[in-house]
Amino acid sequence: MKTDQAEEQTAQVELHSLRLSDDIVVPDSILSEAEKNRAAAFRSCAARRLFVAGRVLCRSIIANLLGCTPQALCLAITPSGRPYLRDYPDIDFNLSHTGDRIALAICRGGHIGIDIERLDAFSEKEACEIMPMILSQQELQQVHQLNERHRHDVFLACWVQKEAALKCFGQGFLADPQNVMLAPGSTTFRSMNQTSGETIFIHSGQIIDGESGDFQWAIATSRAAAEPQWRHHKSGIFF
Ligand SMILES: CC(C)(COP(=O)(O)OP(=O)(O)OC[C@H]1O[C@@H](n2cnc3c(N)ncnc32)[C@H](O)[C@@H]1OP(=O)(O)O)[C@@H](O)C(=O)NCCC(=O)NCCS
């Protein structure tokens, strides 16, 4: 019997989240010169803080995993902006931020993309405007059959699933989100990039946190992975 290689080899996934409270100073001392320069180029203070905190989070956690110092890691960037570990091709990671929340996904044995959005990321009206640009005809029909409240939730889930998939493939929205076929309403499934034929495995869900807001999240991996568990960190551990 023919077996599917993608299913034979599974990926190991870790998910980390950090809530960046307002009172925390975020030092950039462990960043590379290139990262410091990029941080300095941000016009918005909030965006700069999130960028620096994301890099500190990712350097600290991956260095701990590898048993090296955070400064020793070389984080390179592809031409489409995707960061990766230059010296560790077997380990992939991806970052997402929204509001004061940063999410980091680490994957051994495959590629990964992550997206996180607040549940109130867009209004009903905005959702109706964006949906035809993101969803395929078939997905759009399925979503339109739902009642208004459910439609918004399912579309938000589709949005983060597509963005996670496009980030896993590496092009982000330079690629057409309509080419990633979803199963609206499902939280774990296998899909395919209609253009490249690449397989993608999706897990998604919500983080309900009354204090800092509620979030929809999704990860997409190039190999099947077990249901991932989140580790939520406090800012004080890193800064
Ligand atoms: C990737 C993309 C979907 C992220 O959108 P966003 O609204 O900033 O969303 P998120 O907060 O979820 O993700 C940001 C993170 O995604 C990662 N990222 C950036 N480009 C990426 C790409 N092409 N593929 C995968 N991940 C990417 C980065 O780690 C970034 O965080 P950082 O800037 O702090 O390092 C969006 O930027 C995009 O479509 N980019 C297309 C490529 C592009 O325009 N490149 C131009 C610069 S070279």
Image (spheres, grey):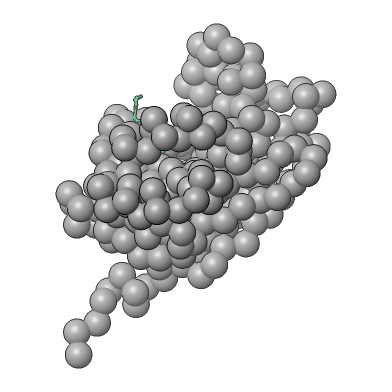
Q: In this view of the protein, which residue sits in the foreground, 149 or 96?
A: 149
Residue 191, quarter of picture: bottom left
Q: Is residue 109 visible?
A: no
Q: Is residue 35 above or below residue 63?
A: above
Q: Is residue 163 above or below residue 13?
A: above
Quarter of the rendering occupied by the N terminus: bottom left
Q: Residue at x 70, y 50 (%)?
A: 208
Q: How many marks?
A: 0
Tell me where residue 4 appears, x and y as whole percent.
Answer: 26, 76
Q: Is residue 36 visible?
A: yes
Quarter of the rendering occupied by the C terminus: top right
Tell me where residue 160 appears, x and y as whole percent.
Answer: 46, 45
Position of residue 82 in the picture relative to residue 137 (left or right): right
Q: Which residue is the extreme one toward the bottom?
A: 1
Q: Is residue 78 above or below residue 160?
A: above
Q: In this view of the protein, which residue sits in the foreground, 161 or 37?
A: 161
Q: Quadrant of ligand 1?
A: top left
Position of residue 30 in the picture relative to residue 227 (left or right): right
Q: Residue at x 37, y 38 (%)?
A: 131
Tell me where residue 195 appears, x and y as whole percent.
Answer: 17, 49
Residue 201, quarter of picture: bottom left
Q: In this view of the protein, which residue sits in the foreground, 122 or 96?
A: 122
Q: Residue at x 55, y 18 (%)?
A: 39
Q: Residue at x 64, y 19 (%)?
A: 46
